[in-house]
Image: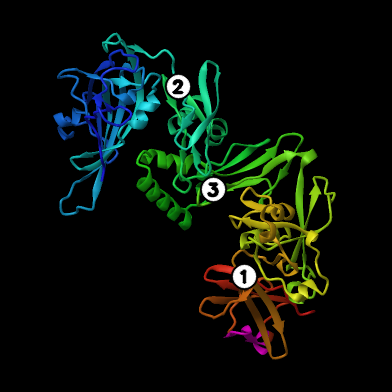
Amino acid sequence: EKISYSDCELLICDDDGENCKKQDNNNDGTKAKSCPRCGEVDFSSVSFYFNDQKVTDAAQVPAVQDSWKKVPDYGLCSDSTETKECPALAGKDPVCVKFSFTMKIEGEAMTDPSKPDQKTPYRWENAKLQIRDCLAKGATCADIAAKMPKEQTGDTGTEKISYSDCELLICDDDGENCEKMESGCRFPDLIPRGYKTSEGEVDGEKYATYMCYPPFVMTPNMYSFKGYMEKEGKTPKEAYMTIAYTAGCYAGTAYIPKCMEPGKAGHCGIPPYIENGKAVEFMMKEEKDGKEDKEDKDDKEDKEDQKDKVEANDSSVSEDEMKFMWEMMPWGAKYECYEGYEMYKTMKDDMGWCRKDGSFEIPRCEQKDSFTSLEFRLLPGGEKKLIDRESGKAFGGIVQSRMVKASGTPMGEWEYACNDGFNDYAAGAICRTQGFMAGAKIQMTKRMSGSKAVQADAFGWTYFSCKYDDVLPQSMWCEATRYKDAMKEMKMKAKCFDFDRMAVKCFKSATFNVGVELISSKRVVVCQVKMEKKGMPMKLDNATLKVKWMLDDKEEEMESTFKKRKGFIIKTRDLNKKEYQCMRCMVQMGDMIVGKSEETCKKQ
């Protein structure tokens, strides 16, 4: 349900809340200001579009109704101009104004009564809205536009309204002798969910920069962004680098970026600048979509989902703005640090990227003299099952860490970490430093620890956790506390014992690991398949898995059987009938190859 308000009466009462009187003068004893108040929509110069085609035949254009010219809560200026007392919301020193906008009104019409679900889009362009009113001193076109209705109920249902080409005139106390506001644009210190960081002027043009309060997403103003591209001949990449977080001024109107809720903005507002560094290249959504003839199915679903969220939660965002956010906003960027600074990299090196929930992962830069990073190692102890048989490398065990300088020089001894507050995402962050893709926390075992007890001062960190499963330990989305600080603040609640040491198990894949091995004997050749998810074996069946037999890198049709514990089996005598030097097998799930064996040759 939508609610609108009018005919306000404000009474000023004594300290007991009684003896209330209408406020009919200012606090200084002077009479409250009054201004002419009226509004009207002029359709004399409109263009009508039906199904995106301009209608040139006047007989086919809908007749303009008198009710369309009316502005809610205002009388028609063409009938009479009523002078009214300025409301308290106009502030202590209000001004009489005239302002106008060019309006675009969009809706959908049913053309066939037998098919009520099939509707055709229409729009009116160049309707002129003119209003005389009383506003707070210093109000701008942007302030007015933010309060204007963005939709209305028309003859065919709900219509969306967008505004442009604002002109604001400041009038004398009688509401006459109006002149264009000389002060030009005013950039507010605060915007919804954000704040101004700087203000300046370049080549006579005013600008301001803004930031959003976390976790809100900075969205460039569509009109200033496109205008800058057209005027300066810039690409979306170049425009985003220059004015993504910037408000501009044109014809007395301030065009200010928006701070939107993450997940509803259609992008993540990945920053062109980071602390002590900057972006050197952006990866744009239009390039990502253009690389394939067909859009990725997940991407399509994301777009529809984002569209639904925006429409449901932010009626001020038009269809044009949604299209703009999807087509011209970046999904990733490469960064570099300024000279004298070192980078805390992401799992994709110097690259940052957007997540589906509207957050982003970016590198950070710190002075080389004070730069420190964490180095990790895994101690499996006697748990041989946590050591890869082929490489001898540990993929699990007790975690130890130490600080190192930018040069790689250790700054102290290896330390254990306490598993209080530890989560799987943090385990994954540690595993990625060891060359794996994912990880999970596990309970430390006696085999890992051996018989040697651990002293309390051997603990370096505690309460290590991360919010996402695509980060490294020193990401802004991870947090940890030095053990000594936790003990000082929380006393025995933070106490860790020998069996509380942090331990992890690492995986090559973030989803599941697949092992494929070719085993041969005199009677059979087996393509052995083993799959596990987070260390847990997965049941296999030949309904989801298929095998390809490759002889000298050419696929060969061969009759095989499937056994759950072994895999795919062919008879050696059938294989001996083929001419080949080397062979291997490939296993696929649907159309995706999930694993392949090493090549085995006859000589072996």
User: Horizontal placement of 452 versus 215: left or right?
Assistant: right
What is the secondary structure assignment of the residue under circle 1? loop
Outermost residue, bottom direction?
523
- Real-space CA distance between mark 1 and mark 3, rounded to the nearest whole angstrom: 26 Å
- Classed neighbour count for the residue bearing mark 1: other residues with Cα under 10 Å, few (<14), some (14–19), many (≥20): some
Q: Is 355 inside the magenta-drawn segment? A: no
Q: Select label 2 or label 3 by which is in front.
A: 2
Mark 2 residue type: Arg
Q: Which residues are magenta?
A: 561-575
Residue 374 visible to an observer of this rendering: yes
Residue 65 visible to an observer of this rendering: no
> Disc 1 vs disc 3: Cβ atoms closer than 8 Å?
no
Return the x and y of residue 202 as percentages of the image width and height.
56, 19
Dot placed on the residue nearer the N-terminal end, 1 or 3: 3
Dot placed on the residue nearer the N-terminal end, 2 or 1: 2
Instruction: Find disc 3 in the rendering and name its residue.
Output: 359
* 386, 89: nearer the viewer: 89
Q: Select label 2 or label 1 by which is in front.
A: 2
Instruction: Find disc 2 in the rendering and name its residue.
Output: 186
* 153, 459: nearer the viewer: 459
Q: How many marks?
A: 3
Q: Where is the C terminus found, in terms of image quarters?
A: bottom right
- When asked about the image quadrant of residue 380, the answer is bottom right
Outermost residue, top direction?
177
Mark 1 residue type: Lys
- Classed neighbour count for the residue bearing mark 2: other residues with Cα under 10 Å, few (<14), some (14–19), many (≥20): some
User: Horizontal placement of 10 versus 272: left or right?
Assistant: left
Instruction: Find disc 1 in the rendering and name its residue.
Output: 534
Name the residue: 78% across, 71% down: 449
What is the secondary structure assignment of the residue under circle 2? loop
Mark 3 residue type: Ser
